[in-house]
Amino acid sequence: MKNLEDMSDEELAMSYVAGNNRAFDLLLSRNQSNLFSYIVLLVGDQDIANDVFQETFVKVIRKLHEGKYSSSGKFCAWCIRIAHNVIIDWYRRRKIRKIVEPPDGYDFSNVIGDAMISDNIENDMVHYQVMCDIRSMIELLPPPQREVVFLRYYQKMTFKQISVLTNVSINTSLGRMRYALVNLRKMIRDHHLELQLK
């Protein structure tokens, strides 16, 4: 039998449905950071994000036991879709119609992975500054554009997956990304930034 640590998220989900509670603990530990970052990005409040995160995982557990997950899809993307729906329900319950901006000073560093290897301290400093500039600019984007950038670049979702998750057409998702990139380029030009990653 395959070791739990060697299983994919999809295999762990099926193992949990079959009765292995340790599989769910591992699933949670693998996915909680990305999922929580997504929730905080949209609701902009740590306490609300904790509530939404808890409600999301209650729904994940229930849907797994109801057989509403098939192992053909990415588990994290499936969880993000559930979180997205929980957030929409949360806003509806509070009669809020627009996405709240993230709080001042929200740090995207837990969302943006640092997979680049630098060969010296100067490159590390340049890379760090570039990532700070990018995070600052992303925070200035309108919420729908910020969301599509997050899902596309940090969650590695396709535009089709993004359109299904956000309940808009693929063209709308593509349009939001296009406007996000136009806005980011404008910010770079207006502030005379030079973004170079080596």
Image (spheres, rainbow, N blue to C red):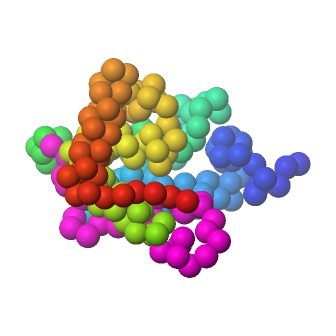
Whether residue 109 sits left or right of residue 104 in the image: it is right
Q: Quadrant of residue 71?
A: top right
Whether residue 135 sits left or right of residue 189 in the image: it is right
Question: How many marks do you count on the picture?
Answer: 0
For the stretch drawn in magenta, what is the main secondary structure? loop
Give the camera-side residue of 113 and 1: 113
Q: Residue at x 27, y 38 (%)?
A: 182
Q: Does residue 165 appear in this view?
A: yes
Give the camera-side residue of 30 and 53: 30
**Residue 164 versus residue 40 in the image, above or below:** above
Instruction: Report the span colored magenta.
Output: 98-125
Which x, y percent locates residue 37? 40, 58
Give the camera-side residue of 136 and 121: 121
Which x, y percent locates residue 27? 61, 54
Quadrant in which the C terminus is drawn: bottom right
Q: In which quarter of the image is residue 59?
A: top left
**Which residue ends up furthest to the bottom in the rendered image?**
121
Q: Residue at x 53, y 45 (%)?
A: 76
Q: Which residue is drawn at 75% across and 49% down?
A: 7
Q: Is residue 107 magenta?
A: yes
Q: Which residue is drawn at 61% across and 68% down?
A: 118
Q: Is residue 36 magenta?
A: no
Give the camera-side residue of 116 and 36: 116
Which x, y percent locates residue 173? 34, 29
Whether residue 9 sits left or right of residue 39 in the image: it is right
